[in-house]
Image (cartoon, helix red, strand yellow):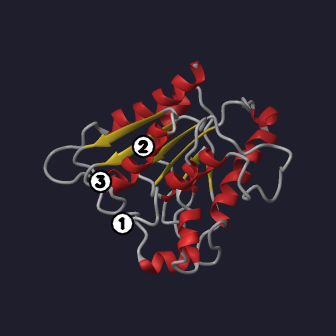
């Protein structure tokens, strides 16, 4: 399942990069790209509620779509990465399982967080003060903590791959590094791919190409999901 970025205030399911779709489909994955309610008309936690509802929907429709209910993986870019990390780290234990298909769980088997904000109380999360007002209704620290994946790190979380541009000036590399270190300290399965010469949304920074290349990143994501299917 792909979750788009856009600071929880813009974007839609069409933002799924074609290279990811092609690579996953070629390797036998069914791919669903989902929409969620956007700020400021709908403030957080509407976005994570919708993502969790989408996970439950896929399980409820697994027979119709030929899906394996035990192998629902998610990946997302930017705020989408934040949302899939939140979904992975909270499973069914947070108060975000509202709406339809409540008989199905909203846990994930694995997740890939691609340059997603991890700790909104620290600098470099990608949310400007105006964004925080639109998405969270103000700078209440409790709300920012509630929306931070780092807040939910605990042992026995599903495997999480983090992909982060070393030259990202929107969501700083410190965000992914903090989440990676927290997951490692908890004993969770995690990997961090720091991409040199890459800014936000796969943009090349400087004269040198991004390293690993975009296609290598795509294959890293597919390989990560493959490794969880085999485990």
Which mark is on residue 203? 3
Q: CA distance from mark 3 to mark 1?
A: 21 Å
- Could you tell me which residue is drawn at 31 percent across and 42 percent down? 194
Foreground mark, 3 or 1, reads 1
Lateral position of residue 193 relative to residue 18, left or right: left
Q: Position of residue 95 (x, y in %)?
A: 74, 58
- Whether residues under marks 1 and 2 lie with C-beta atoms below 8 angstroms apart, the answer is no
Q: Earlier in the sequence, mark 1 or mark 2?
A: 1
Mark 2 residue crowding within 10 angstroms, few (<14) / some (14–19) / many (20+): many
Give residue 146's position: percent from left, percent from top.
59, 63
Which residue is pictured at 16% across the width and 53% down the height?
A: 206
Could you classify mark 3 by the number of other residues whose Cα lies within 10 Å: few (under 14), some (14-19), or many (20 or more)? Answer: some
Q: Residue at x 56, y 26 (%)?
A: 228
Residue 123's label in the rendered image is 1
Q: Is residue 228 left or right of residue 37?
A: left
Q: Which mark is residue 229?
A: none
Q: Earlier in the sequence, mark 3 or mark 2?
A: 2
Left or right: 37 as drawn, with respect to 101: left
* Figure label count: 3
Nearer the observer, 215 or 153: 153
The picture places residue 92, in percent across and down from the top left corner, at: 73, 47
Residue 27 visible in the displayed image: no
Residue that protrudes farthest toward the front in the picture: 185
Q: Residue at x 75, y 35 (%)?
A: 65
Any mark on residue 180, and which? 2
Can residue 76 be spotted in the picture?
yes
Provide residue 34's location: percent of width, then percent of height: 63, 53
* Mark earlier in primary sequence (3, 1): 1
């Amino acid at each position: 399942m792909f979750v788009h970025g856009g600071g929880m205030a813009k974007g839609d399911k069409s933002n799924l990069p074609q290279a990811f779709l092609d690579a996953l489909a070629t390797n036998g994955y069914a791919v669903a790209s989902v929409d969620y309610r956007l700020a400021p008309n709908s403030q957080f936690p509407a976005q994570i509620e919708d993502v969790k509802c989408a996970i439950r929907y896929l399980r409820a429709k697994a027979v119709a779509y030929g899906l394996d209910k035990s192998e629902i993986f998610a990946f997302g870019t930017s705020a989408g990465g934040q949302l899939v990390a939140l979904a992975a780290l909270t499973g069914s234990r947070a108060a975000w399982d509202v709406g339809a298909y409540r008989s199905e769980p909203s846990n994930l088997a694995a997740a890939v967080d691609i340059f997603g904000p991890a700790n909104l109380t620290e600098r470099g999360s990608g949310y400007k003060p105006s964004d925080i007002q639109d998405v969270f209704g103000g700078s209440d620290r409790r709300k920012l903590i509630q929306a931070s994946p780092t807040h939910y790190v605990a042992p026995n979380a599903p495997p999480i791959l983090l992909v982060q541009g070393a030259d990202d000036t929107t969501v700083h590399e410190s965000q992914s590094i903090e989440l990676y270190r927290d997951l490692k300290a908890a004993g969770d399965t995690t990997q961090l791919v720091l991409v040199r010469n890459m800014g936000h949304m796969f943009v090349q920074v400087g004269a040198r190409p991004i390293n690993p290349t975009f296609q290598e990143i795509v294959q890293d994501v597919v390989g990560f999901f493959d490794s969880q299917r085999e485990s």
